[in-house]
Image (tube, coloured by chain):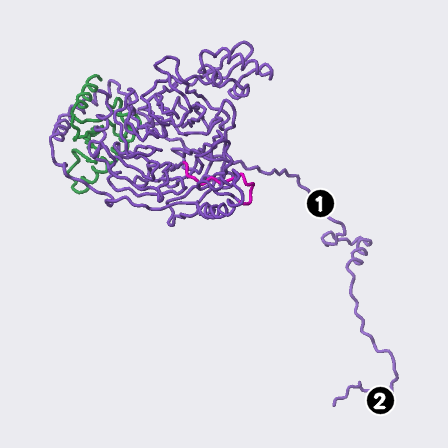
Amino acid sequence: MSNLNPPLNDAGDELGDSESVSLFVESTWRRSSLAVQSGDYDWNDRFGTQTEPFKTVDNEAQTVIPKSIEIQTEPDLQKTIDLDPQLAEHVSNFLKKVCPFVESQILANVESRAFEDYQVSWEEERDTIGLLHTLYVEKYELNVQQGKQTSRSSNKNNNTSRNRDKYQGNGITDNDDDENTTIASHGADLSWNSSGSLIAVAYGRTDHSGWCVHRASVCIWNLMRRHVRTGNPDTELELPCCVPCIAFHPDQPNILAVGLFNGEIRLYDINNAEEPLIMSSTIEDCFHREPISSLSWIKNISERGYVLVSSAGDGKVLTWAPFENKLSHPVSGVTITPGNTAKNRFPFLGVTVSAHCGLSANTFNSYYVVGTECGTLVRCVQNLQQRKKTKEKRGDFVWSNDAFQLVSSGNPAAKLELIRHVEKHARLQALKAIECADVFASRPNPLHLYAPADSFVLESHSGPVYGASFSPFHKNLFLSCSTDSTLRLYNVSSPKPIISLEPSTSFLYHIEWSPIRPLVFGVCDSDGKLHLYDLHDNMLGPVVTIPASQNRHPVMSFRFNAQEPSLLATIDQSGHVGIWQLSSQFFTPQKGEQHLLEKLGSLP
Amino acid sequence: MAEVEETLERIKTHKGVEAVIIVNSDGIPIRPSKGMDDETTHKYAANISQLAAKARSVIRELDPQNDLSFLRIRSKKHEIMVAPDKDFLLIVVQDPTVSS
């Protein structure tokens, strides 16, 4: 144990102060202030007690607003070289060298039998026609069954007309809504899109007796998916009334034109999921007030690109340029009216179908054919005026080029009256410049605005004409079919048909040429069958009859697929869509077909 | 210039000939081309001059002393005959099975 206590002094020290060791820390600031006072100041000593002055810098900043713009390269303008004398000399030297040999080969070709029996098959040959898919809307099917059950039970209670409506046909009642609104589930029309991968199906009833109180939809299926969803459409567009006809744009695979029962025409963009409806026309006296009976996209009338031609039961055939004016008004139109001379007189009841020559602009035909409900086939001449380029000044008003062209191409007898009517409206509105929209806003008489078509009557059917189609390979030939069970091939220049055939005793609803083979066409009837004709093999009857509908429901429409030639789609009244795969004979070109067609179609 | 026209017309009158086109070394058709509209003429000119150039390079690769003298393509609908030269190309489209 150590001794912790400090040793005591022997002398017996008492408590006393120890020598404190003190530390002295020098103050920095005192020293410096002392130094300053005493003049020993050294500026190098950092002692500052003052804040440095703030440094400020002025700068401008700006938010950038991005703007997006689409850029596209224009395709190179195709040029050709014209022959000038110097070039001509070179060319003629070249031709002198080359021609003898070429001509001898041409002649040899005609004689040669080398390739006569030689056939190459690039694809697997198919001998039979098979059903690939049946597309239907499942919820319609379930509701049909439900509807039948409920109506059976309620029928016992009362027999009002409302219940009779539920019980009829395949209509279904949506129990949540007002009892008067039913969902139309009958099939009405089909359309393939321009790339051949989507099929759009329009639903609508054909047995209306008054206003349409149905809700309908257009369903779109994508057939290029690995697993085609047969029970559920990939896209469904809801519409407020039945849809008698639809047509996809021939170039743009996502634009669909829809014609409604109330006379409206709408344009949809399929790719746009939130807002597919791009534009729609209104219902006015000058537009359509009856169900649209046919819609077709026509190319290149007076350089407007693709225009939409619509015909309806009110006897008007209107041409719309949807991408120019968003369907606010048609660019031109005609009324199909009975002619004045005894030769031209025909009973008039409403346009059921209009067929236009579908060939490219170079082989353009100025005729188009309109079929009516009373069986008459009317051949009309297209108005091929060049688009007016200048404005027209009349008195106080300056008419725009399109507006003046619109009124000048109206009924010639009423032209002055129409101009005065529009100018009166413009005066009331205090307008100086008159545009197309103003012409329509003044609500002119449609018979004045749309001239009667320059028409000629071809030999008529005895029942409503429901199908007409121009051949894609011959500019003057077209087929028509009607409820008198006959289908006829006409040359548009002569009134009598070339061939008249009767595939069955039932009504014929749609006829269409094949887009691949010039001599093949199909016609569908109300007995559930689709007849395919091949004039190369058999000129009298169909080569194949497909039972397109399971329960012999009427087949309302069918379409060939131009991009996938082996596919054909049919739709029947119960709303079932059948996708058929055709046998190779229907899409492999045969030798000499075009010439046979021309021979057939030539006038005696 | 009339001579060229006359020669082309003569070729066109042979049985089954549908179109006659002259193309220069850049693949641009020289007007007038007989029997075909502008758009199709350009398609033919562009495609066939490329094919003729490829055919020529194949022949020369297989045998450097050899060269292309004539090219014929037979399709289901017709036969395309191509006569090449240093500066130009003559294309004749004929359907040999037509019976007039």
* Residue A13 x, y percent position in the rendering: 87, 85
The residue wearing badge 1 is A54
Query: In terms of depth relative to the viewer, which is nearer, B88 or A124?
Result: A124
The residue wearing badge 2 is A10
Going by the picture, which residue comes out furthest to the top? Answer: A395
* Residue A354 x, y percent position in the rendering: 38, 26
Which hue is chain B drawn in?
A: green
The answer for which chain carries disc 1 is A
Q: Nearer the viewer, mark 2 or mark 1?
A: 1
Residue shown at the point (77%, 88%) measured from the top left = A3
Main structural element of the magenta stretch: helix, strand or loop?
A: loop
Magenta-drawn stretch contains A232: no
Whether tag 2 and tag 1 are in contact, CB under 8 A, the answer is no
Amino acid of disc 1: Phe
Q: Which residues are magenta?
A: A175-188
Q: Quadrant of residue A350?
A: top left
Q: CA distance from mark 2 to mark 1?
A: 71 Å
Amino acid of disc 2: Asp
Which hue is chain A drawn in?
A: purple
Query: In terms of depth relative to the viewer, which is nearer, A26 or A485?
Result: A485
